[in-house]
Image (cartoon, rainbow, N blue to C red):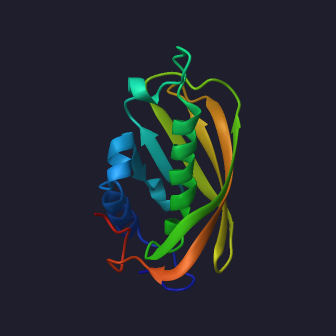
Amino acid sequence: MSEAGTRPTQEQLDRYAEQFNQSQTMRLLGVRLSFPQGEKAVITLPEVRPEHRGGLGTAAINGGIISAMFDYAIGCTPALVDPSRRCATMQLSVSFERPLRGNTVRAEAIIDSVGTSTLFASARMYDEKGQVCARCQGVVKISQMKWASGESPAVN
C-alpha cells in the first residue's frame, strides 16, 4: 500500500475503516472507526446503550467501554502510516477526568511519534457536548507482517 515516506490515501484509509468496522467486536460494541482528513483515528459510539453505562446505577459510560474505545483508537493509528501492516496495542494509560455522560461518545487519537516498529499515540474522549472527559496515551507495535488480505485488517 504505502511506500516508505508516503502517507496512505484517504481512499486506502476509508477502505481500512470499512473492513475494520465489519469485525464482530466493533459491531458488538456498537462503535465505528474513521480517519477524517487522514490525520487521526476516530472511534465513535453513536448510540450509547444501557449495557455501555457504568455500575451502581450511574448513567455515566463504564470505564471498560471507555478503555476499549481508547484501545481501538490508539491501536488503529498505525494505519495513518501504513494500513497494510499488522499492529497490536502494547500499552495504554487512561486518565478519567470527569464522568462521561450522554448518548454519544467520540475518541480521537493522533500519532505522537513513530519508529520502524513502535508507535506512540495519544487520545481524548469527548462527550456529546464536546467536553474532554478522559485522556489516553498508548504504545503500539507495528509488525512487518501484512494483513492476511494484503491491504487491511482480516475480517471473519
| Residue 93 x %, y % | 71, 48
Q: Residue placed at 46% from the left, 57% from the top?
A: 37
Of residues 126 and 70, the one drawn nearer to the viewer in this rendering: 70
Q: Residue placed at 58% from the left, 52% from the top?
A: 109
| Residue 11 x %, y % | 35, 67
| Residue 56 x %, y % | 56, 16
* Picture quarter with the N terminus: bottom left
Whether residue 81 sits left or right of residue 30 in the image: it is right
| Residue 146 x %, y % | 43, 81
Whether residue 47 sits left or right of residue 134 in the image: it is left
Of residues 40 and 27, the one drawn nearer to the viewer in this rendering: 27
Q: Residue furthest front?
A: 56
Image: 78 above or below 51: below
Q: Quadrant of residue 40?
A: bottom right
Q: Residue placed at 35% from the left, 78% from the top?
A: 148
Image: 33 above or below 38: above
Q: Residue furthest top?
A: 57
* Picture quarter with the C terminus: bottom left
> How many numbered marks, from 0 up?
0
Of residues 97 and 156, the one drawn nearer to the viewer in this rendering: 156
Image: 99 above or below 26: above
Image: 82 above or below 38: below
Whether residue 92 sits left or right of residue 69 in the image: it is right
